[in-house]
Each structure stands twice: as C-alpha cells, then as structure tokens.
Image (cartoon, rainbow, N blue to C red):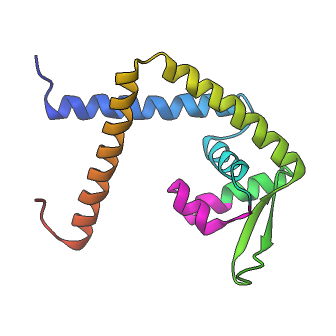
Amino acid sequence: MARTMDEVLDQYYESWLGLDAVYEKWAARYGITFNMLNILTLLDGQAEPAAQSELCRRLHLSKQTVASVIDSLEKRGMAVRRVSEEDRRSRVVCLTEAGSAFAREISTALRRFELDALARLSAEERAALVDTTHKLWRSMADALAQQETGESAP
C-alpha cells in the first residue's frame, strides 16, 4: 500500500529528529553539544582561521547560535577570536592547541562512527540516501525562495 504524502512527511520528521538525537547523544559522550561538534569538526578541517560569518554560512546556523557556541568554546579554552588580518572589521575563530587536539580526536571518532553506520547500507542505499537528501534540500530551498519572493510553484 502506498504511503500518503502526510505519512511520508511524518516518517521524514521521525528520521530527521532521530538523526539529530543520535548526533546530540554522540556529542554528549564528549561533553559537547551537536553545534559545538559541528564547529569543532569544521574548524579542524580548515588550514586557516574561519570568520564567524563563514561558520554561519557553512553550517546554516544563525549569528547568535555561532556566537554562543564560540563563547562556550572560549570558556573551555578550545577557541579564541581574533581580528582578521585581511579584513580588520571581521573577527576570525581559531582553535587553541587544546582545541585542535580535541577537534582532531572527535573528528576522527565521528568519521569512524559515521562510516560504520553507512557500511550497514548497501552501495545502492547509500547513493539513494545522498541523492534524495540533496534533492529534498534543493527542493525545500527553492520552495522557500519562491515563498519569499511571492512566486507560485511551477
């Protein structure tokens, strides 16, 4: 029996919120939040310090959320804010030595965890997951843009 659009959406919500909960629980094992995990792993993969605006853009988070997470990381001695050498009006976020070591540790552990979970899916399921998730993201972004401009759907 085919699922209705409402049933599909309900199952999508359950999956989305379930994934969020798994990542929160995983991050909590290391004494951090999911947003801290995202910022630490992003900064770990960067050769240069990142502007707070870049963190917002790349992680799709608000300025307030990023500022709050950076505040928490600074209090823990894992990150510092500095004035950008390229644009004196901008501030960049740098990991401290302790922050870099911790970010490397959790980035490696998270990658292992995610690869283990993905390995439980077939190659076809992995491809379908990524392709469909990307299409849904683009569809939702397009629908939002249309709502914001007042255009009607195609």
Q: Nearer the viewer, residue 23 or 106?
A: 106
Q: Is residue 59 magenta?
A: yes
Which residue lies at the image location 66% right of the left edge and 34% below the top edge? 27
Total number of numbered discs in the rendering: 0
Q: Is residue 116 magenta?
A: no
The image quarter in which residue 141 lies: bottom left
Lateral position of residue 4 relative to residue 144, left or right: left
Q: Nearer the viewer, residue 29 or 113?
A: 113
Which residue lies at the image location 12% right of the left edge and 65% below the top edge? 152
Above or below: residue 109 compared with residue 44: above
On the image, the x and y values in percent for residue 48 come to 74, 62
On the image, the x and y values in percent for residue 30 come to 74, 32
Numbered range of the magenta stretch: 48-67
Q: Nearer the viewer, residue 133 or 128?
A: 128
Lateral position of residue 34 relative to residue 144, left or right: right
On the image, the x and y values in percent for residue 102 come to 81, 40
